[in-house]
Image (tube, grey):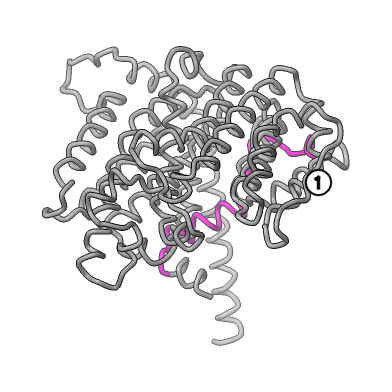
Amino acid sequence: MGKIVDLLSHPVELKSALKLKYIRQPLFTNKDTRGTPELIRCYELLNLTSRSFAAVIMELHPELRNVIMLFYLVLRALDTVEDDMTIDPQLKVKVLRDFDSKLDLEDWSFNGNGPNEKDRAVLVEFPCILKEYHKLKPAYQKIIKEITNKMGNGMADYIVDENFNLNGVQTVKDYDLYCHYVAGLVGDGLTQMIVHAKFGTSSLYEGNTQLFESMGLFLQKTNIIRDYAEDLEDGRSFWPREVWSQFADKLVDFSSSNPKLQRKGIECINALVLNALGHVIDVLTYLSSLREQSTFQFCVIPQVMAIATLELVCNNPDVLKTNVKIRKGTTCYLILKSRTLSGCVEIFQHYLRQLKAKIPVDDPNYLKINIQVAKIEQFIEEMYQNKLPEGVNPVQTEPYRLTLERSKWDAKVTPIEQDEEFKFNLTMTMLMTFAAAIYFYYVK
């Protein structure tokens, strides 16, 4: 009932939800997802583990759809081992370090997760994943195995680090490294796949690892800020001590009912928001370098969700007590709005303005956040340069050149959006006419 009330109180989101559900059509059919019983089961496991990721993966170009689906499931299996606090640490480390070698096998599964681990089915039914994995092109298999090796060993390193287990991440450098292992490497693998499929410029991967690293770190850092209360409840933390120790003696102090400690907790949240904002320019550069529409949509949706979530957690005391989330209707709106780079940029501009307005003047990072937002806004102006005086030619910078090239794809999407809008308006007009006819016939 609460979700319905939310939608009714936000008509733009209600309209987006209806268009997404009944009007919008995927770019590609999903016939190739039902080739074998094992493939069908893989997509069922995908839906069980993440309905949101499943939705965007299902709409990918056939060249990458099965590849990314299997990549996701392999890493989900890895993450399910790492996340399960019921597994003996020694066994956990062994499984994580050896996980990539299991990809060479025809048949392997793991039944050591606790009974309440929600994604344990991915490991129990791993043989069906292996069977489909071995059907992929060798280049894609190599990428998946390479990333699995790096991520598994990175996760294992943190488990054997007793200091990490007791105190979480120590420095901002450690924070970045941890996020690299659990998210930056995902960006690494996905980018290799995108470049191999020729769906993005070669500059995405060659010589600038910072771009795909930022794609992962921006998402992960936003989630870490949001998950403060949930992680503490699980007996762990990922907020870097170098940051939170400026505001409290113990990380758990922020969850206190003491108003002064709560205020310090909010200031700490804002400091971590500032850190996450440092990745936004790289994110926008990466997105402007994509050259295939379904791949763009796959990459852009998590990023616009992240900026919306970052604005939600900014200066928000609820983060210290519970796991806050953006509304479902907002999600629908963001999915539709972000189909073009210009739409994505508008979303970032909107939430950056909202975020900046939420920071009180007496916050220790008030000035730094305003400066960082100004840098991003200046970069966006360089991307578009559409407000230059008459007669002044745009400066041919790399951001401008990439945006100009990407705008050709945006031009193809605009007629689709206009057609959907026409169909929606026509449908609503017909429904309202029908309702009015029923009313006058039976009531009047």
Is residue 301 within the magenta segment? no
Dominant secondary-structure state across the stretch colored magenta: helix
Which residues, given as a range, are shown in magenta?
A: 9-33
**Side (left or right) of 208 relative to 390:** right
Residue 349 location, quadrant: top left
Depth order, front residue of 234/284: 234
What percent of the width, then of the height, locates residue 232?
44, 60
Which image quadrant: the C terminus? bottom right
Q: Does residue 207 appear left or right of residue 278 in this picture?
A: right
- Residue extending farthest to the bottom is 443
Residue 407 visible in the shown view: no
- Return the residue found at the far left: 362
Residue found 62% across the figure and 54% down from its top: 22
Across and down, in percent, residue 229 comes to 42, 61
* In this view, 281 is above or below 326: above
**SS class, disc 1:** loop
Residue nearest the viewer, comparing 340 with 434: 340
Task: Indicate the quadrant containing the N terminus: top left, top right, bottom left or bottom right.
Answer: bottom right
Res. 386 image quadrant: top left
Question: Residue sitting at 81 percent across and 43 percent down?
Answer: 40
Q: Which residue is mark 1?
A: 125
Q: Residues within 10 Å of mark 1 (few under 14, many from 20)?
A: some
Q: Residue 284: where, in percent of width, then height?
A: 38, 30
Q: Is residue 82 left or right of residue 177?
A: right
Residue type, mark 1 in image: Glu
Asked whether residue 320 is in view, the answer is yes
Image height of 212 relative to 51, above or below? above
Residue 334, placed above or below residue 127: below
